[in-house]
Image (cartoon, rainbow, N blue to C red):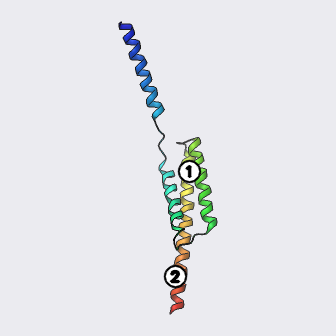
Amino acid sequence: MKRMLKNSTATIGTVLVLCLVACATTQTPQELTDARSAYQRVQTQSNSSTRFKPDKVRAAKVALDMAEASFLDSPSSQETRDLASTARKKAELAEGSGLIEADVAKAEVGKDAK
């Protein structure tokens, strides 16, 4: 009886450990979360009056897609974090250039009105 109880306890313990390992999820790197947010801002703002250069937005999307693919292959790798950081920077570049062009256009309109 004691032997059966020991085997049952060991089996239950093994099953619990396997369940915990199987249920563990991989944490998304902060760099990828930041890249997603930056690209989402560009997407949201591109529907407003601010116009972004399509080539810069496309470059940001391609970089984000590469980071997402790397995350699926190797979630915690340095390469994934580096690609995500590059994607964030490209999205911020697209956002910044669009905002600068919008400011220049506003300044020209104000200048013409005087």
User: Quadrant of residue 14 in the image?
Assistant: top left
Q: Which amino acid does label 2 sit on?
A: Lys
Residue 29, percent from left and from top? 49, 47
- Please rate how many residues cluster around mark 1, counting C-alpha atoms within 10 Å: few if below 14, some from 14 to 19, many from 20: some
Disc 2 target residue: 106
Between 76 and 53, which is closer to the camera in this rendering?
Answer: 53
Q: Check the image and name the residue furthest to the front.
A: 47
Q: What residue type is labelled 1?
A: Asp
Identify the residue at image location x=56%, y=75%.
101
Identify the residue at image location x=48%, y=52%.
33
- Please rate how many residues cluster around mark 2, counting C-alpha atoms within 10 Å: few if below 14, some from 14 to 19, many from 20: few
**Residue 51: mark:** none
Q: Check the image and name the residue furthest to the left.
A: 2
Residue 35, percent from left and from top? 52, 55
User: Quadrant of residue 13 in the image?
Assistant: top left
Identify the residue at image location x=57%, y=61%.
90
- The residue tagged with tag 2: helix, strand or loop? helix
Image height of 48 relative to 70, above or below: below
The answer to whether mark 1 and mark 2 are in CB contact below 8 A is no
Residue 44, percent from left and from top? 51, 64
Q: Check the image and name the residue furthest to the bottom.
A: 114
**Residue 82: mark:** 1
- Closer to the N terminus: mark 1 or mark 2? 1
Residue 11, percent from left and from top? 43, 18
- The residue tagged with tag 1: helix, strand or loop? helix
Q: How far apart are marks 1 and 2 (CA)?
A: 36 Å
Image height of 18 relative to 32, above or below: above
User: Quadrant of residue 55 in the image?
Assistant: bottom right
